[in-house]
Image (cartoon, helix red, strand yellow):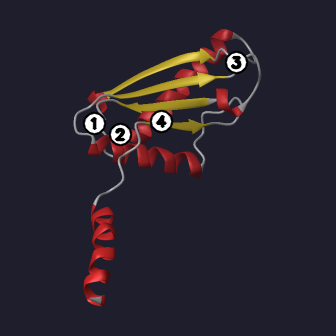
Amino acid sequence: MRRFAALLLLAPLAACAGRPPPPPRSVVVFFSQWSAALDPAAQKVIDQAAAAAKAAGDSTVRVIGFADPVGSRAANLELSRLRAQVVVDRLVADGVRSGRIVKSGRGPTSYQMMSQESRRVEIKIAGQ
């Protein structure tokens, strides 16, 4: 009886262990103010997004850059595009086919404050 009870307890654990967690649908990479440089934490997030994108087959990967509202709109639009390109380059280096990636820069966010949340790139993987 003890052996049977142990098997019943282990069966759900084995089922959970055999099923990988679902890949993320959207991830965010943060940047320092006026920077498009990737720090180690950002690189790790992009590497995880690349793995999820490759697991998602041929679905579209959207890369959307943002900037905070400090400075001119033109400068922030260019910075948001540059941030998006840096992320795209890393995704491609990690094996995501460039033809699947749609890139855009949106410039300053609608936030009326300066924060790291506005200095970001969103990676969205469709079809998951």
Mark 4 and mark 3: Cα distance apart in space: 22 Å
- 1 or 4: tag closer to the N-terminus: 4
Which amino acid type is shown beneath numbered disc 4? Val
Q: Which residue is mark 1?
A: 97
Which amino acid type is shown beneath numbered disc 2? Val
Q: What SS does tag 3 mark?
A: loop
Crowd class of label 1 (few under 14; some 14 to 19; many from 20; radius 10 Å): some
Relative image position of residue 115 (x, y in whole percent): 73, 29
Relative image position of residue 88 (x, y in whole percent): 42, 33
Q: Residue at x 69, y 29 (%)?
A: 34
Q: Which residue is mark 4?
A: 87
Mark 2 and mark 3: Cα distance apart in space: 30 Å
Mark 1 and mark 4: Cα distance apart in space: 13 Å
Residue closest to the far top: 73
> Is there a contact, CB below 8 Å, between mark 3 and mark 1?
no
Nearest to the eye among marks 3 and 1: give it. Answer: 3
Establish if 4 lies above or below 81: below
Depth check, front residue: 124 or 68: 124
Q: Which residue is mark 3?
A: 111
Mark 1 and mark 2: Cα distance apart in space: 6 Å
Q: Residue at x 48, y 24 (%)?
A: 64
- 4 or 3: tag closer to the N-terminus: 4
Q: What SS does tag 4 mark?
A: helix
Q: Which residue is mark 2?
A: 92
User: Where, by quadrant of the figure, is residue 2 drawn?
Assistant: bottom left
User: Where, by quadrant of the figure, is residue 49 drawn?
Assistant: top left
- 2 or 3: tag closer to the N-terminus: 2
Crowd class of label 3 (few under 14; some 14 to 19; many from 20; radius 10 Å): few
Which amino acid type is shown beneath numbered disc 1? Arg
Establish if 16 lies above or below 32: below
- 1 or 2: tag closer to the N-terminus: 2
Nearest to the eye among marks 4 and 3: give it. Answer: 3
